[in-house]
Structure formats: C-alpha cells, structure tokens
Image: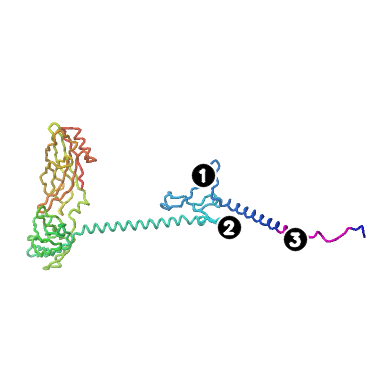
C-alpha cells in the first residue's frame, strides 16, 4: 500500500487566478471581434471603392465629383456631365465611379446614394429628360406669351378705328348714293390735345374721276358726319367693277394733312338687288395706308454719277425706276425722286424730278449738277435719294430711299468708289430702295 502513487485533489484555485483567467479570455474575445470587424470593413470597402481601377499603360486620374446637368436633347450626343449608360454590365458596375457621394447604412455597410444598381442607373437619364422637357415646355410657353404680347401690341397699333357708311343704288337713275355716317375710336394725331381734326375723302376706283370729301370736325376722335354723296351715270355693269376708296385724314393748318388710314370696299361683293330702294349699312375697319408696302418690294432705282474734280462738280442722272409698289388700289402710283447733296451729313442742296403719273416703272432721264465744296473731293460728300408717291390732297408718301456715299456700305459704296476712282466718266448702277 505504501508503494502505490498518492491520488488526491488538484492544485487549489485562488481568487486572483480566476480573475486573471477571466480578464485574459475577455481581452482575447475583444481582439478577435475587432480583427474580424476590421477585415469585414476592409473587404466591403474594396468592393465599392470610389477610386476607379487604372487600365494597363494608363496612369490613374483623380476623380472630379460634380453634379450631373440636364441633357440638351435626347437625340443629341452632347451631355452636360458624365452619366451612366442605360445597360451596364455587372463587372463594369464596380469600375464606373458614381457621380454622387456615398453614405453609410445602419448595418455598417457602405451604400451609394444614387445609381448604386443598374436599375436605378437606367432610370436616371429618363428623369433628366423629363426635367429637360419640362424646362423646354416652360421656355416655349414664355416665348409664346412674349409673341402673343407683341402681336397684341401690333394689333393695337394697327387698330385705327372704324368707318360707318351706307350704300344705296338706284337702277332707274343709274345713281349710287354713299352716306358717310361716322368714325369711331380714331387715334389722336395732336399730342397736345389728345385728339384729331378728322375728315374723310372718298373716290371711285379705278377711274378716279369722282372725288368728294366731308367737312372737318375739330378736336374729336369720334366724328359724326351724316353726309350724303350721289354719283350719277353708273350702270349695273360698271357698278360691279367699281371700288370705294375712303381715306381718313386729320387736318393740319401749317403742313400737309396727316393720313390716319384707309378703307377699301369693292362693290363686286355687294348684292344691291336684295335691298332695292333701301340703304345698306356697312362697317369697315380702318387700315394703315402703308401696310401694303410691307408685303411688296420697294423697287429699284437706276442712277448714273460723274465726278469732275477740276470743276468741283458732281453730275447725277436719274434714269428710271422699276417694280415700285402699288400705292393705290388701282395698282398704280405717281412717283417722283428727290435728291439731296450732303456735306458732313448735312443737307446743303436739293433737286427733284418731275412727277410720272400712274406708273410703277417710271422713266425720268433727268440730269442734275451739284457744286461740290472747293478742294474737298468726295470724302465727306454723299447723296440721298427719296422716291415718293405724289398726292394732290394728302401728304406725299415715301416709297423708298437710297444713300450713296463713302460709308453707305454694300453695292452703293462700291458704286461710289468706282466714281471716285474714275473721274469724268459716267457710271450707272441699279440699286434697291430701302425703308
């Protein structure tokens, strides 16, 4: 019994030993958790890193983050910023940097704010296109509003009032009675008083033989005339080819009367048989008289010039004109030409041709000699041509103008330079008339 080994209890564990074992186990577990968390973060961070992998042979470029702007148009290839393509491959999703920043998810992972998956990247261009379309719609609406406002302003400027008149035809007496009743909403021609001194002139076209006019009513924009005018010797066949031409004017004591507007009423569309023996009441809008020039060309003028430096003279020959606009309803005009000699942009001499009646292609063949200031040459000299339509009663209207000089530009300046470089030689050129 004495030679057998002694079996008894193990080493006794003291309290400090137990505390040390617990602290060591806790420290080991905490370290293991920290290493695990660090490895997990490093792995997830490398999979969604913002820095793009560089291609072979190309150095890495720094990423410039900027907000994407709207695409100009869906069809055009110009884009304001780098946008992801509609169908990215799964492998390229990690290589393509997102233009938007990133934020951390509550679980600890890193998640992109926008465009993190292919489906959201496919919808981002559509959102940009929708915003673009909305912006374009707003711009077009604004442009349409501006155009409408301009059209309203033009209409207001073109609205010159209304003319009220009555017609009555007597087939037994072959007479046409025209009663000018009144005008309304005329524009004021006298800025001081805010009114006009209107009257109405009437003539029958195309003959222009019958001309009448009403009395002048002072300081009013709504004149009431109630005047009757009877024209005799008009058979029914002539009646269908006759046109009433009203011109509304404002009387001016010290200069030519101002033209407010005109009314043209062809009688071919008026049925007098339905109202035999009765007066037919009519209302027409007054239109600007020069409105027709906007839709027609102003024509051309053929001018010949000759400079004589020894005598200090400039000879101007107005040869002819062509394709002038039709200034009256008969399709004709009564043109003539005024010529001004300008020195340092100041008019120092004036000439004019004779009036050519009822033609849009007048032939003048008139020569004029202007004295040029001594030893000045043609450097500070220029010529101004005005083609006007003559009228017996109203103010003569300007059909077009032409300026020839060293600073006139275009063909006019070329013509002037040829005249200066070739003295004592007549040089003729066609020139288009301008407004």
Other-residue count near label 2 (Cα within 10 Å), few / some / many at <14 / 14–19 / ≥20: few
- Residue 112 is tagged as none
**Looking at the image, how many numbered discs can be counted on the residues?**
3
**In the rendered structure, which disc, 2 or 3, sits on the residue that comes first in sequence?**
3
User: Which is more foreground, mark 2 or mark 3?
Assistant: 3
Q: Which of 144 and 381 is in front in this view?
A: 381
**In the rendered structure, which disc, 1 or 3, sits on the residue that comes first in sequence?**
3
The alpha-carbon separation of the residues under discs 2 and 1 comes to: 29 Å
In this figure, which residue is indicated by the disc labeled 3? 15
Residue 121 on image: x %, y %: 50, 55
- Residue 61 is tagged as 1
Q: Which of 302 and 134 is in front in this view?
A: 134
Instruction: Please tell me whether mark 3 sits on a helix, a strand or a loop.
Output: helix
- Asked if 381 appears above or below 389 in the picture, the reply is above
| CB-based contact (under 8 Å), mark 2 and mark 1 | no
Q: Nearer the viewer, residue 429 or 45?
A: 45
- Asked if 39 appears above or below 319 in the picture, the reply is below
The alpha-carbon separation of the residues under discs 2 and 3 comes to: 40 Å
Other-residue count near label 1 (Cα within 10 Å), few / some / many at <14 / 14–19 / ≥20: few
Q: What stretch is highlighted in magenta?
A: 5-22
Residue 99 visible somewhere in the drawing: yes
Instruction: Verify whether residue 241 appears in magenta.
Output: no
**Which corner quadrant holds the N terminus?**
bottom right
Instruction: Please tell me whether mark 1 sits on a helix, a strand or a loop.
Output: loop
Residue 36 on image: x %, y %: 64, 54
Instruction: Please tell me whether mark 2 sits on a helix, a strand or a loop.
Output: loop
- Residue 108 is tagged as 2
Residue 227 on image: x %, y %: 9, 64
């Amino acid at each position: 019994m004495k030679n057998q080994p002694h079996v008894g209890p193990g080493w006794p564990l003291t309290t400090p030993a137990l505390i040390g074992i617990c602290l060591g186990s806790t420290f080991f577990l905490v370290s293991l958790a920290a290493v695990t968390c660090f490895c997990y973060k490093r792995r997830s961070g490398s999979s969604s890193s913002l820095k793009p992998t560089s291609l072979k042979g190309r150095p890495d470029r720094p990423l410039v983050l900027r907000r994407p702007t709207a695409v100009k148009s869906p069809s055009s290839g110009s884009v304001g910023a780098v946008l992801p393509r509609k169908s990215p491959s799964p492998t390229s999703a990690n290589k393509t940097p997102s233009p938007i920043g990133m934020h951390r998810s509550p679980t600890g992972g890193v998640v992109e704010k926008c465009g993190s998956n292919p489906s959201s990247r496919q919808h981002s261009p559509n959102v940009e296109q929708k915003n673009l379309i909305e912006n374009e719609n707003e711009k077009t609406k604004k442009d349409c509003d501006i155009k409408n406002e301009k059209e309203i302003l033009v209409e207001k400027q073109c609205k010159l009032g209304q003319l009220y008149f009555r017609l009555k035809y007597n087939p037994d007496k072959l007479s046409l009675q025209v009663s000018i009743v009144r005008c309304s909403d005329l524009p004021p021609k006298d800025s001081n008083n805010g009114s006009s001194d209107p009257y109405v002139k009437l003539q029958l076209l195309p003959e222009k033989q019958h001309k009448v006019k009403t009395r002048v009513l002072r300081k009013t924009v709504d004149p009431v005339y109630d005047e009757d005018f009877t024209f005799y010797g008009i058979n029914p066949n002539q009646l269908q080819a006759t046109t009433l031409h009203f011109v509304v004017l404002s009387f001016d004591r010290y200069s030519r009367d101002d033209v407010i507007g005109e009314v043209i009423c062809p009688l071919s569309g008026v049925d007098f048989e339905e109202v035999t023996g009765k007066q037919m009441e009519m209302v027409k809008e007054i239109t600007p008289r020069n409105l027709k020039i906007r839709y027609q060309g102003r024509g051309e003028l053929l001018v010949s010039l000759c400079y004589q430096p020894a005598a200090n003279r400039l000879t101007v020959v107005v040869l002819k004109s062509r394709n002038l606009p039709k200034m009256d309803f008969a399709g004709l005009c009564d043109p003539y030409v005024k010529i001004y000699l300008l020195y340092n942009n100041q008019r120092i001499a004036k000439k004019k041709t004779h009036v050519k009646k009822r033609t849009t292609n007048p032939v003048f063949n008139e020569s004029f000699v202007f004295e040029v200031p001594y030893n000045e040459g043609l450097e500070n000299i220029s010529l101004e041509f005005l083609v006007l339509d003559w009228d017996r009663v109203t103010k003569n209207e300007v059909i077009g103008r032409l300026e020839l000089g060293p600073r006139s530009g275009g063909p006019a300046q070329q013509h002037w330079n040829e005249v200066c470089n070739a003295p004592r030689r007549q040089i003729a050129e066609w020139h288009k008339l301008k407004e």
